[in-house]
Amino acid sequence: MGLGFGRKQDAGSHTVWFLLGAALPTSLLCFLLASDCLGEGLSASLSRSWGIRAVYPAADGASEVMFKGLPELLPKVAMEDKTVIITSVNEAWAQPGSLLDLYLESFKNGEDTAHLLNHLLVVALDARGLERCKAVHPHCYFLNATSANMSSAKTFMSPDYLEIVWTKLIFQQRVLELGYNFLFMDCDMVLFRNPFRHFPVYADMSCSLDGFDPSRAPLDNPLNTGLYYVKSTNRTIQMMKYWRAARERFPGQHDQSVFINIRHELMSKLQVKIEPMETLYFGGFCEYHDDPKKICTIHANCCIGLDIKVHDLKNVAADWKNYTSLTPEQRHKGGFKWTYPTRCRESIK
């Protein structure tokens, strides 16, 4: 989830989707994936029929003002396939020893992850957050898109908290419009392995979960928008507009809750292919597995409070360092367990 302090989801028991794809000629793709080849006029017509209206200026001139410098910055950060990794911070999250430091350090200590720092764009939501970002990371961007006070830690579901988590969607929509794919990762997360190996190539959007039950239909598992990968197509741009516009239908709810409410609409009306990802690879404090050979990320979900998140994520980072220091023979013996996130679990009672 955006710059929040955890969603109150029930913790599941400790529990693969894999890749599928085929290369198709462009003409066939346009036939099968018609929404990717929509003209601007038809796309706008469909938006009106779905009840989507402009919540923020959409004209090129307005976008150039709101996102000044972004078209020039993205090529410097993106991978060869025009993919960028995005996280967002405010002053509280970017303080020394807080979540941003833990997040960046995990890239350096993970397996096949250090090079991904070259493709990470940290979006600062306040001036002090930007200042701190520039001190520790080369790719920072200041998003000044709301009048809310973005600097301090926010109480879960407070008005300022809601503005923070919804603001990230404005930025992500513009990234897609500029032709870039993105992987969004909340900053209250640690990275262990390259996550791109586990995103299904046929999906428009791959999304993490709070818990995985194989007996359920995939989309009926509890989605968590703290980590999601989105490809840049006309279809996904319309998805972001639809998602943001749906906020008015569900007043007082955060972005993840609204997304869960509209997930089937996105598939039926926009033909968006959404693929949930198992907690075996993308875990969190709601549900994780004591199998360090497969884990890619652990998210401090099911947790409320900045200091509490930092405390329990530091334990996880220390566990990973201990594991990677073991010899292959010691790892093979098994018996590894993550330190239980006691404070986070207590924070949600």
Image: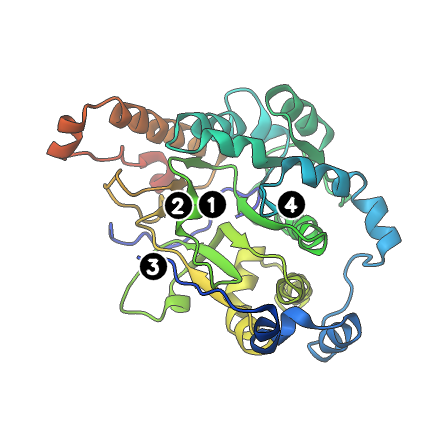
Q: Secondary structure at mark 2?
A: loop
Q: CA distance from mark 1 to mark 2?
A: 9 Å
Q: Secondary structure at mark 1?
A: loop
- Which residue matches tag 2? 348
Furthest residue to the bottom?
49
Q: Residues within 10 Å of mark 1 (few under 14, many from 20)?
A: many
Relative height, residue 151 to residue 148 (above, below)? above
Nearer the N terminus, badge 1 or badge 2?
A: 1
The numbered disc on residue 278 is: none
Tell me which amino acid carries mark 3: Trp
Nearest-to-viewer mark from 2 and 3: 3
Residue 332: give x, y in percent of width and height.
14, 33
* Quarter-of-image position of residue 299: top left
Tell me which amino acid carries mark 2: Ile
Q: Secondary structure at mark 4?
A: helix
Nearer the N terminus, badge 3 or badge 1?
A: 1
- Which residue matches tag 3? 17
Tell me which amino acid carries mark 4: Ile
Nearest-to-viewer mark from 3 and 1: 3
Q: Residues within 10 Å of mark 3 (few under 14, many from 20)?
A: few
341 relative position to 188: left or right: left
Taking the spot 50% from the left edge, 42% from the top edge, the residue there is 5
The numbered disc on residue 164 is: 4
- Which residue matches tag 1? 6
Q: CA distance from mark 2 to mark 3?
A: 30 Å
Q: CA distance from mark 4 to mark 1?
A: 14 Å
Closest to the observer, 325 or 223: 325
Q: Residues within 10 Å of mark 2 (few under 14, many from 20)?
A: some
Q: Please report contact status of discs 4 and 3: CB closer than 8 Å, yes or no.
A: no
Nearest-to-viewer mark from 4 and 3: 3
